[in-house]
Image (cartoon, rainbow, N blue to C red):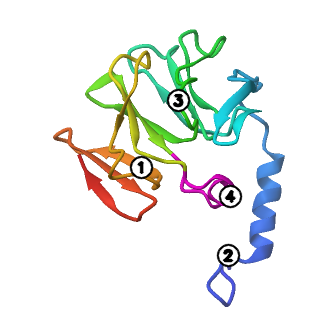
Amino acid sequence: SILNSGGEIDRGVLLDAYADLAALPRVGGEWRAAGPMPIDGVYMPQGRIPGSGRVNAFVIDPRNSDIVYAAASIGGIWKTEDGGQTWRSLVDQQVPLIYGGLVMDPANPDVLYALLGEFDGQVYSVYGFLANGILRTDDGGATWSLLGADTFNGASVTALVFDAAGDMYASSGQMSVYYG
């Protein structure tokens, strides 16, 4: 039987399945680093510190798969227009550079929303949520404007979704859902 007496998958069956999986031939190509690489420093309340942060989101332009955006936890928002060969930062002068995600407007790929802050215990314990809204660009990252600063002050935006009518909904570290 696959299940043990407690209704869980039997440990021996699980170990056998992992052994079978490890014996399968590998498929796919080799992985290679495509950036963005660590940068000299990011702007934090303590000043400029080195780092790039973990990547919390990738967004690919549906019109051109060579255009990719990446949102890093403590490292900003990056863009490549050559499929990852080169990257450039889009938000170097924004403070702080903590991004929990990035969402492309389904009706217009030039409109992106950067979710400020992270609902992450480790980041919060060191820096606080460092959140004050959502950044929006209408021009593929050339310029940004801040939305919802009063509503999301001190609360990380954890998700942003659109319904079929194009209405936007956001959830936050305050455990609430907001309609915009």
Check disc 3 and report its element: helix, strand or loop. Answer: loop
Mark 4 belongs to which amino acid?
Gln
Determine the secondary structure under disc 1: strand
Question: What is the tally of numbered marks visible in this picture?
Answer: 4
Q: Please, what secondary structure does the residue beneath circle 2 have?
A: loop
Q: Position of residue 133 (x, y in %)?
A: 40, 44
Residue 122 numbered tag? 4
Confirm or deny contact between disc 3 and disc 2 (CB under 8 A).
no
Decide: marks 2, 1 in contact (CB < 8 A)? no
Q: Amino acid at mark 3?
A: Gln
**Callout 2, which amino acid?**
Ile
Whether label 4 touches label 2, CB < 8 Å: no
* Disc 3 from disc 2: Cα separation: 49 Å
Mark 2 residue crowding within 10 angstroms, few (<14) / some (14–19) / many (20+): few
Q: In what element is the residue under mark 4? A: helix
Measuring from the top left, give residue 66's x and y in whole percent. Answer: 52, 13
Residue placed most toward the observer, 80 or 46: 46
Disc 1 marks which residue?
159
Circle number at residue 9: 2
Q: Residue at x 70, y 42 (%)?
A: 46
Camera-side residue of 152 and 7: 152
Q: Earlier in the sequence, mark 4 or mark 2?
A: 2
